[in-house]
Amino acid sequence: MGDWTPGRIVQNRLIIFASHHYLLVAAFLFILGLIIADEVERRTRRFREVNAQEAAQLINRGASLLDLRDRQAFEAGHIANAVRIDADDLTERIATLAKSNPPAIILCCQHGEQSKRYAKKAAALTTTPVAILKNGISQWKQENFPLVQKTRGPA
């Protein structure tokens, strides 16, 4: 006779379930893999995502804010003291900012995706902590934080 311990019974039931529902098990394993990959990426990246409240606190402590949106979007409304830059100028701007030793450099864009792409590059260029505004200016607006319309920064 076989070993009929509770652990062995559960193991047998899992094998039977998996053999009858192989697509469900494959989907579960795929999703689990995506979750693990995302978590590994979050823990190994050199920048962090901050919400609007955290960004405001960092800005109040002297963090530099770089806005990656185009001129028209920037002029329509931006965070006070933000400097609009073209993504092509990021390397030069980060080097200049790092010399002034801000407590952090925050990147923002409309929805957070462009910032995320460039944050990896920015973090590699400086020892100053780099952050991105999670979900971008759209989240800032949604949480009713103020925007200004005065132009600031290079073209």
Image (cartoon, rainbow, N blue to C red):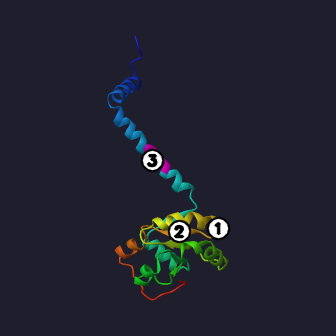
Q: Secondary structure at mark 1?
A: helix
Q: Residues within 10 Å of mark 1 (few under 14, many from 20)?
A: some
User: Does residue 36 appear left or right of residue 141 in this picture?
Assistant: right
Query: In the rendered image, is residue 78 in sight?
Result: no
Q: In the rendered image, which quarter contains the N terminus?
A: top left
Q: Distance between the Cα atoms at labels 3 and 1?
A: 29 Å
Give the overall secondary structure of the magenta segment: helix
- Disc 2 versus disc 3: nearer the observer: 3
Q: Is mark 1 in CB contact (under 8 Å) with mark 2?
A: no
Instruction: State the image coordinates of residue 94 (x, y, percent, origin top left).
Output: 62, 74
Disc 3 element: helix
Which residue does the image show at 62% across and 72% down from the upper left?
91
Which of labels 1 and 2 is toward the front? 1
x and y percentages locating residue 98 in the rendered image: 64, 75
| Residue designated by label 3 | 34
**On the image, numbered disc 2 is attached to which residue?**
131
Q: Is residue 112 above or below residue 153?
A: above
Tag shown at residue 46: none
Residue farthest along the top direction in this orientation? 1
Q: Which residues are magenta?
A: 32-37
Residue 15 covered by magenta stretch: no
- N-terminal of the pair, mark 1 or mark 2, is 1
- Does residue 98 lie above or below 48 as drawn? below
Callouts 3 and 1 close, C-beta under 8 Å: no
Numbered label attached to residue 125: 1
Q: Secondary structure at mark 2?
A: strand
Query: In which image quadrant can residue 19 be found?
Result: top left
Name the residue located 40 percent from the left edge and 74 percent from the top edge. 140
Above or below: residue 24 compared with residue 1: below
Considering every residue shown, the one lying at the far right of the view is 99
